[in-house]
Amino acid sequence: MGGTSDAHVVVLGAGFGGLTFCQAFRHPSARITCVDRQNHHLFQPLLYQVATAGLSAPDIAEPIRTILADHRNVSVRFDTVREVHLADREVVLDGGRLHYDYLVLALGGVTSYFGHPEWAECAPGLKTLDDALAIRRNVLLAFERAENEPDPVARQRLMTIAVVGGGPTGVELAGAFAELSRHVLRRDFRQIDPTQARIVLIEATPRILSHLPERLSTSARRHLERLGVEVLTSAPVKQMTHGRMELEGGMTIAADTMIWAAGVRAHPVTASLGVELDRAGRVKVNPDLSVPGHPEVFAIGDLALVLNPRGQPVPGVSPAAMQMARHVARIVTRELADLSRANSLAARPAFTYVDKGTMATIGRSAAVAKIGALELTGYLAWIGWLFVHLIFLIGFDNRLSVLLQWIYSYLTYKRGARIITGLDRPSNRGDSTQPDSCSDPASTSTKAK
Amino acid sequence: MGGTSDAHVVVLGAGFGGLTFCQAFRHPSARITCVDRQNHHLFQPLLYQVATAGLSAPDIAEPIRTILADHRNVSVRFDTVREVHLADREVVLDGGRLHYDYLVLALGGVTSYFGHPEWAECAPGLKTLDDALAIRRNVLLAFERAENEPDPVARQRLMTIAVVGGGPTGVELAGAFAELSRHVLRRDFRQIDPTQARIVLIEATPRILSHLPERLSTSARRHLERLGVEVLTSAPVKQMTHGRMELEGGMTIAADTMIWAAGVRAHPVTASLGVELDRAGRVKVNPDLSVPGHPEVFAIGDLALVLNPRGQPVPGVSPAAMQMARHVARIVTRELADLSRANSLAARPAFTYVDKGTMATIGRSAAVAKIGALELTGYLAWIGWLFVHLIFLIGFDNRLSVLLQWIYSYLTYKRGARIITGLDRPSNRGDSTQPDSCSDPASTSTKAK
């Protein structure tokens, strides 16, 4: 594969896939360059907790350099990927170019608005820490504005949060917002009653958590409704403007905070590859996870379309990305070792996904989980969710800090991270609660710049 | 004083002074409105730890509403103070006006550039969480850029941090940056050696920590130099541009990160009062802390000039602000009680400051402290510093989390908060390391917007 004993392996992305590859790769002399546009690896399954003021940003993130400090053959490069030129074996970054012998594409996904990119201004997605901090800021500011708002209609809009998308992220966000308003903020205000906040979860298909068995969807819905969340199913979004959403069927929702958790598509760099993609921009990889026609290039995680033996796509979850990373690391390690011993390439094994289960949490003490044939709901599933997430959090200090904050929040109904930052220019505080057109680029005064 | 049993007391600022007033005020029926432009109270003595990636923002901040949740007669208003009209007994906010019977001015100070406001663009101050997060981001980004910088002169500039001002904040920042580069970042990079970072502390007067006895200044300087900090004394700043600082005497320093910890002046609202101010904009208050000619208005904390019996100003430290707050709370509580019993006003007592000592920490295990006649240096002073700061941190969860992070950092030399956020637009990542004129408003691409 063009590799020598000092071959250069370039890994794009330091999410679960890219990082696992760097850790699992074992060749003694090959160099790895790992590129990410953030300086930190993010534990995305807990990102909704930062958005809902349960955890602080450093709790769920760890510098990539620190995670890889002991892997002396790995260089970390903090840069943005623009294009990949497969023919030249070259990656174009904002700050330069990298030539590779092997390439691992692990850039993950971006929020998809299904042909309505202008909705991004009205209803931001939740993919990065900055997204989460912006959502937290906007929700806390909306309650502050409501406290001083004399008009009851405007006040209700400020106290309404609409979450689009009934997958795990949407369900977890809606549950956490309901608890924030019902319990955490309950005693903080004098004019408004935060327990009157309206939390709406909007799902286009007939049921939430549609990747889980129907029994679990029903249980999740019941738990959410018990927390006070309005769950609307079979309700695709038709139109959006700032503060206002129209659903198919004619229902409209006036909500100062709208969050889009409905769709993900592959990182846009896949479009520069010139290979076959699916509708979500994912690379249709070979069974060994290599890119067709380019055995030296692999795509793993959310930007790869991998079919299991029954022809269904492997889900875009972190365990799948990590399994793919280990699979590719084994192939590349072995091929480089064989080359240095002047052996011929062995036939590559096909990737097989081992489903270890899937879960979603609903508020402070309920969850739904499917582990093999086992279906769990309620408190037991929540305890399972808690421990799985703690165990996989990277970094001892994070883990201890997160555990303590959870115990504290659980016992006291308080949340430690209700801090508004990012307002350092007073003009950012201007009242922007008037509905604007989403396509108006000037109407971002309360957004992070 | 115009008060009735449902008198309205307005408190401007929820720092140590304003918050302590709200907590110490005991009248059963009077209403308090506490106004702050942040939603959180900030534990400013630890702000340098957020700037140097030791703690996360929520660790040292607590929502004002939460702190005052049990004080049912206190309303919190999240708004910016513009002016005070003493004659009308009215406060003008961005979002409205407030009429008061008693007014407590507790807005604290702002960074002062001694007649060079244009330097704020080159060398930001450290007064808010957003300031601290911007400094952290800039320092971490500078090291990231250095890793990819081929030119050795530019690389050294990226790895140089200049801190102006040898008071406690400057000393603590310089010590913490030295440790960050010498120990924490040491193993993270492949091209640069962070232990070669240059940390310069610049003080205009002949010694650092000039409010402490000379022996302690000397000890602090020795500790800083042992950590690798260059300490320049008798070195006032003459001129600044982005990335470059010129000192009186001709020395120039090329530093990508420059921080201004040299001066504080009173919040600008004091200029709207029409009463006598000192050169730093502080109100020259009466012995009872009231504003001359306005017995219903008090100024406390950093925006008040209070002279002790020997004619020296009371220092701008949090214990002084808290003592002033309790003094004023006693006066106002008693006067409102007397009024409701139709008694005449008693003569007000004069404020006296009780100095409980002062301390500054230098890196991870040294400090200097003066407590009465006792002067402490080194490890013992550091242990004292640690416990005093932990005890006064507001909020149990913060305290435990901070203690654990300190223990962890102490044992491992790691820091948990080395996370760059606030880069959500890729264009913010553009290379802005070229020196620009400070007065160029476009040259803020790496600043928080």
Image (spheres, coloured by chain):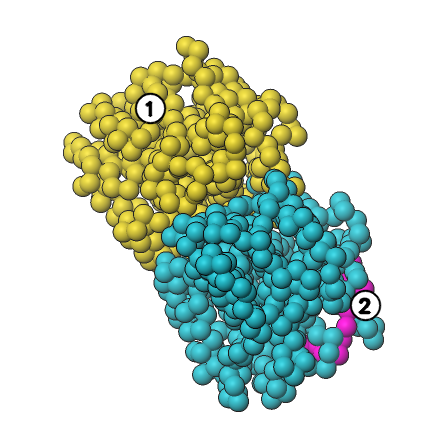
Chain colours: A cyan, B yellow
Query: As drawn, is B374 to the left or to the right of B104?
Result: left
Say if labels 2 and 1 share a chain: no
Residue A233 belongs to magenta span: yes
Residue type beneath disc 1: Val
Q: Quadrant of the N terminus of chain A?
A: bottom right
The residue drawn where x is 30% and y is 38% is B363
B396 or B297: nearer the eye? B396
Kindly indicate the quadrant of the structure image that contains residue B321: top left
Secondary structure state at the residue bearing disc 2: strand
- Please give the range of residues in magenta: A230-241
Q: Main secondary structure of the magenta part?
A: strand
Label placed on residue A260: none
The residue drawn where x is 25% and y is 41% is B365
Query: As drawn, is B156 to the left or to the right of A264?
Result: left
Tell me if mark 2 has few (under 14), some (14-19) or many (20+) residues whose alpha carbon lies within 10 angstroms of its own.
Answer: few
Residue type beneath disc 2: Lys
A406 or A329: nearer the eye? A329
Residue B196 x %, y %: 38, 32
Query: As drawn, is A435 to the left or to the right of A258?
Result: right
Q: Which residue is under mark 1?
A: B231
Of tags 2 and 1, the one toward the viewer is 1
Query: As drawn, is A100 to the left or to the right of B329?
Result: right
Judge whether residue B316 can be spotted in this image. Answer: no
